[in-house]
Amino acid sequence: MASLKDLRGRINSVKSTRKITQAMKMVAAAKLRRAQAQAEAARPYAQRMERMLASLGAAVADSPDAPKMLIGTGRDQVHLLVVVTAERGLSGPFNTNAGRFARARIRALEAEGKTVKLLTVGRKGATYLKREFGSRFVGEVSYHNVKRIGFEQADELATRITAMLEAGEFDVCTLIYNRFQSVISQVASEQRLIPAPLPANDTAAAPAAAGELPALYEYEPSEEELLAALLPKNLAIQIYRALLENAAGFYGSQMTAMDNATRNAGDMINRLTLNYNRTRQANITKELIEIISGAEAV
Amino acid sequence: MATFDLELVSPERLLLSRPVEMAVIPAVEGDMGVLPNHAPMIVALKGGVIRVTEGGRETERLFIMGGFAEITPTRVTVLADEATPVATLSRAAATQRVAEAEAALAAATNDAPEIREKAMDRVMAARAMQEAAQAA
């Protein structure tokens, strides 16, 4: 049986743990709000980009010299997986989920005889996947010293991927990240980046343009040139969205994890306190018995 | 006077969304003034200033760092790579950007023509920014 002093020590240490997890939860909640607002602010651009792409893509899609980014290289051999995870842990199953999803994808692709290349964003994903798939790595990106993810980072990443595409280093590019479903639920999912999945013209554009006639656009400069400039932007915006959702999801997941930890610490304190009081009473009873039986013996 | 809806969005936020009478946008092939009922167009933009007219007066001047615009008879959507109100442009920052862009262009002399062209575009955009900052 633990002594009273031991129990007191344990209660105090669990109490300070609870303070830390509680503080982390509050910080995560504040950062989550900011991340959500940022994701919200990025949405209009993405929506309008989609609308523009839908009308442009329809005009160019059947031309044989459409840009590579739209139609791909025509092969399906080398897959580039971009795995987005957080920089830090203490966030429940957040990083592990994305990692596990990526691992399953890599295994499935390799079983089909494809070549897989990996580009990780965020330190946690890199450490998770490195041991098993170290030879497939073509790069890792980390933003641990970036305070606030901006469009710049996404643009940089997009430029890098574009350069790899130009150099013929891969045929298909897929993004794996935690989709932000709600504060308590993030779902590891994938999104194809290259060849770009075109928003279907009639489904995506129609509701947005309700009441407007389907316009026949004039293009300046030509469709091909416009598309060549628009597609890398679209790539960047897709990546930007994934980065933001990843950030928001991370804070959401961390908040949930820290909330659970705080509650567990509370339960533990209750148990330990009960134990402490029982031990204290047992000690008093024992002392009383000793005194009484001592007095009787006299 | 008739108006149309002007929307100006950058990847990071929605900067402007309201009915205006006229907007002058810096298209790659020359500035263009857009009035209501313009023919539908999609144009690429270069670095320059968007001027907005409301109530017969010029009310907003925003600098954009290239982008795209979608024009329909009732709406103009500008997707800017980066956008700042001209009044908040800093001359020092603009000068620094010009220097950076020029250095990048100088470093790209041996690269493919497309890369050089892109670097050139950036120099032009940075110069436009500097000009706008000086005029403000």
Image (cartoon, rainbow, N blue to C red):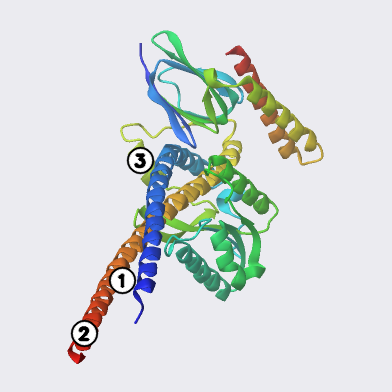
Identify the mark at residue A254; answer none if there is no mark. none
Could one spot residue A232 in this view of the protein?
no
Q: Give the SS element for disc 1.
A: helix
Which image quarter is the C terminus of chain A in?
bottom left
Q: Numbered disc 2: what chain?
A: A
Q: Is residue B30 left or right of residue A274?
A: right
In the image, what residue type sits under mark 3? Ala
Q: Is residue A248 left or right of residue B42?
A: left
Q: Which residue is mark 2?
A: A289
Identify the mark at residue A206; answer none if there is no mark. 3
In the image, what residue type sits under mark 1? Leu
Q: Is residue A209 left or right of residue A188?
A: left
Seen as rendered, the residue at the extreme bottom is A297
Q: Does residue A139 sit above or below B49 in this rendering?
A: below
Q: Earlier in the sequence, mark 2 or mark 1?
A: 1
Could one spot residue A14 in this view of the protein?
yes
| Real-space Cα separation, disc 2 to disc 1, in angstroms | 26 Å
Q: Numbered disc 1: what chain?
A: A
